[in-house]
Image: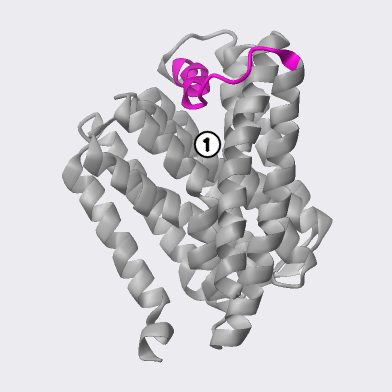
Amino acid sequence: MDYILIAAGLVCLFAGGEALVRGSVATAHKLGVSPLLIGLTLVGFGTSAPELVTSVAAAFAGSPGIAVGNVVGSNIANILLILGLTAVIVPIVTSRDAIYRDGLALIIASLACLGIVLTGFANQVHGIILIVLLGVYLAYTIYREQRVQDAASDLHRAETEIAEPGPQQLPTALTLALAGLVLTVLGAKLLVSGAIALAESAGLSETLIGLTIVAVGTSLPELSASIVAAIRRQTDLALGNILGSNLFNTLGILGITAIVHPLEIPVEIARFDIWVMLAATAAMLAFALTGGRLCRWEGGVLLAGYGAYLAWTCREVFAA
């Protein structure tokens, strides 16, 4: 029964996330919103909606291991698993302008997350700080890209192409977005309930479940978007998608979760997983800045890194 709840939750999250992004993007187009703003906000927020709803639901369910593990684990999976797999399929062309700006923002966000994790508690003040940082990033990016046309601004405008064309009629687009939101909320409740039940029945920590099953499951929209970008040979969008998603995960999701329901940070995340997230972020940026592309062997290194991370994180399962 636990696995059925988890599977049903993942299906609802994936379908809901896709519908929410497509409906929101189509609605924004019909309302005359610029491609820049759509790519920077709706696509980033939309693909991170499963993580947001799941973390908030887990926090209210009294499961901080799932709530925080989902954020940290999703960031790790986005880089090592999803970006690594995408680079293995098709080498990813990188833009130094985009990497310098968005990469620097991600470094700042990751260090802010580290600081909060090391305090052992994410409270409302921490959440407000993270949301303010996200607001500053969005405001600066919009201000700069309205005045300077460079590779970074082109990347954000092109991110609207990740979402498939949505409905042409405004009422249909709004209905699709609302249906996606409802499915996402339902999927999060099913996933969290199943994850808690699985942890209890299997004698595993909720943090382990949050870092692995929940984190990978809520990253399915990013996986879908990156694979589509790779197939279309728009590989720069795949990297932009991961950078934006990890920014929203760290600043937006952890920030909102801490504001609506302050929570303790599991000790194991502070000891190990947050450092893996930082190492993965550093490796991604180093690979992206060398040679103007993230090639297949570098993608293989990222994938191998995720395999090693899973092996270490799940060692208690293997031991049993």
Identify the residue at horizontal 70%, vertical 18% (top origin).
27
Q: Is residue 245 above or below residue 199?
A: above
- Helix, strand or loop under label 1: helix
Residue in the foreground of this view, choosing between 176 and 240: 176
Please state the horizontal and vertical placement of residue 18, each as a whole percent of the image: 57, 36
Circle 1 crowding by C-alpha within 10 Å: few under 14, some 14–19, many from 20: many
Q: Amino acid at mark 1?
A: Gly
Residue in the foreground of this view, choosing between 172 and 268: 172
Q: Quadrant of residue 301?
A: bottom left
Left/right of residue 54 with respect to residue 245 in the rendered view = right
Identify the residue at horizontal 45%, vertical 21% (top origin).
155
- Specify whether residue 161 is painted magenta: yes
Q: Is residue 279 above or below residue 88?
A: below
Tell me where the magenta segment starts and ends, as one range. 153-170
Identify the residue at horizontal 53%, vertical 21% (top origin).
160
Please state the horizontal and vertical placement of residue 38, each as a whole percent of the image: 61, 21
The main secondary structure of the magenta stretch is: helix
Please state the horizontal and vertical placement of residue 65, each as a whole percent of the image: 63, 71
Q: Is residue 285 above or below residue 255?
A: above
Query: To which residue does mark 1 refer?
Result: 244
Please state the horizontal and vertical placement of residue 290, each as a whole percent of the image: 23, 36
- Specify whether residue 203 is painted magenta: no
Residue in the foreground of this view, choosing between 269 and 38: 38
- Look at the image and tell me whether residue 163 can be seen: yes
Q: In which quadrant is the C terminus drawn?
A: bottom left
